[in-house]
Image: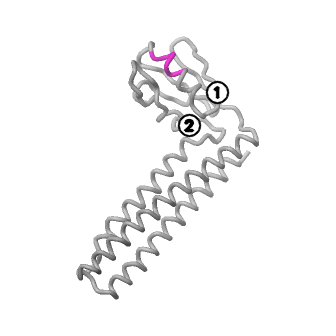
Amino acid sequence: MSSQALATAEPKMARAVDVMVRDFQAVRTGRASTALVERLTVEYYGTPTPLNQLAGISVPEAHSIVIQPWDRAALGAIEKAIQKSDLGLTPNVDGSVVRLNIPQLTEERRRDLVKQVHKRMEEARVEIRNLRREAADELKREEHDGEISVDESRREHEQLQKLTDRYIDEVDRNGKAKEQEVLAV
């Protein structure tokens, strides 16, 4: 009889890795990507709204992003949100669109981005470890309640540790790849 704790922990760990990878897409690498600005929140008529719900975002060239709001009244709010963000980009309002030119990253900015990547990796590791702890507590409770035997509990704990190690390795692998991408000139 396999424990429910492992069955519920694995998809949550996978989701933690997926969220981290999606967050990595928003880290600037010197190339334009819509993921850089999609989740940027804009104060639109007093309501924080994701940019991708206010405008069409496109990448016409490798080093520029064009944001075309559906409501021209949102241009100023979009410009302000981009300036407040930690992207380090200056928006150019061009009539009815906002253009963002993506310059080459300086060495200092690359190091800052690598720090952001490492911080996000550590957050994902902590989340995975917390999920492991929750599952281990559930296993201990099941053992205490007599639902599973001591030997089965030990086997489940070992499987849980292997699962945790696998997802931590995946976090490290994805983080290392993003770090290489940021540091590539």
Q: Does residue 50 sit above or below 69 in this rendering? A: below
Q: Amino acid at mark 2?
A: Ser
Q: Are marks 1 and 2 in contact (CB under 8 Å)?
A: no
Q: Which residues are magenta?
A: 74-79
Front residue (pair 56, 11): 11
Q: Amino acid at mark 1?
A: Asn
Q: Residue at x 61, y 29 (%)?
A: 64
Q: Does residue 175 sit above or below 6 in this rendering? A: above
Residue 114 in percent (x, y) is at 66, 49
Q: Does residue 31 sit above or below 94 in this rendering? A: below
For mark 1, does the 10 Å Cα neighbourhood hold few (<14), some (14 to 19), or many (20 or more) residues? Answer: some
Secondary element under disc 1, as helix, strand or loop, is strand
Front residue (pair 150, 30): 150
Q: Residue at x 41, y 19 (%)?
A: 70
Residue 108 in percent (x, y) is at 75, 41
Is 28 on the left or on the right of 13, as rendered?
A: right
Q: Residue at x 36, y 65 (%)?
A: 9
| Residue at mark 2 | 33
Front residue (pair 31, 110): 110
Q: Is residue 8 magenta?
A: no
Quadrant (top left, top right, bottom left, bottom right) of the N terminus: bottom left
